[in-house]
Amino acid sequence: MMRWGFFWLLFWTFPFPLLGLEGLLVPAARFFQLAASLTVLVALEWAGGMVGPMLGLLWAHALVYSMTLYVLSRGIERGCAVFLPTHGDRRLLVGLTILLVGWGVLGEPYDSSFHHSDAHASLVALYR
């Protein structure tokens, strides 16, 4: 069951390319946030033009990246079962959590034009 811990950690922190735009990186959770917001907007006020394809692109990226993270977290879990002693996967999860969240909060690993401050952002600024 540690795979879900690894999955959610990576889901909220691991940066993926944003819609193929060069240099823009956001976590998979941000794709779901943007796709859900745009879906609500389209449901309330239909918008033509590029909104439909953009909505499809956001949902497709969100699902593909989430499936990728699930496969990755399952591989991490299986690797832990083979190479680490009992409860080693929990220690690895705690270590990865500290590392990724610390990197996300203290650094500016994310790059997106879809948040309030400048293009480079920490994990806190990204979800504000």
Image (spheres, rainbow, N blue to C red):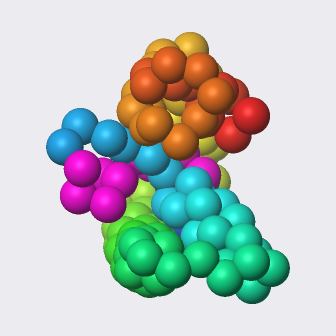
Task: Answer whether residue 95 is visible to the viewer in this image.
Answer: no
Q: Give the answer, above or below, for where 11 lies relative to 69.
A: above
Q: Nearer the viewer, residue 17 or 56?
A: 56
Q: Position of residue 36 (x, y in %)?
A: 68, 72
Q: Determine the residue positioned at 32% across, 60% down.
A: 19
Task: Answer whether residue 97 is visible to the viewer in this image.
Answer: yes
Left or right placement of residue 39 versus residue 25 in this view: right
Q: Determine the residue positioned at 59% across, 21% down.
A: 117
Q: Position of residue 74 (x, y in %)?
A: 44, 76
Q: Determine the residue positioned at 30% across, 52% down.
A: 17
Q: Residue furthest left?
A: 22
Quadrant occupied by the N terminus: bottom right
Residue 18 drawn in magenta: yes
Q: Determine the residue positioned at 51% across, 35% down.
A: 100
Q: Position of residue 21 (x, y in %)?
A: 24, 50
Q: Residue furthest top?
A: 106
Left or right placement of residue 103 versus residue 9 in this view: left
Left or right placement of residue 118 versus residue 44 in this view: left
Left or right placement of residue 2 versus residue 119 in this view: right
Q: Nearer the viewer, residue 70 or 92?
A: 70
Q: Give the answer, above or below, for where 95 lies relative to 34.
A: above
- Quarter location, residue 35: bottom right
Q: Nearer the viewer, residue 39 or 93?
A: 39
- Quarter location, residue 65: bottom left
What span is colored magenta in the figure?
Answer: 12-21
* Number of numbered labels in the structure image: 0
Residue 44 drawn in magenta: no
Q: Position of residue 99 (x, y in %)?
A: 51, 30
Quadrant occupied by the C terminus: top right
Q: Nearer the viewer, residue 79 or 74?
A: 74
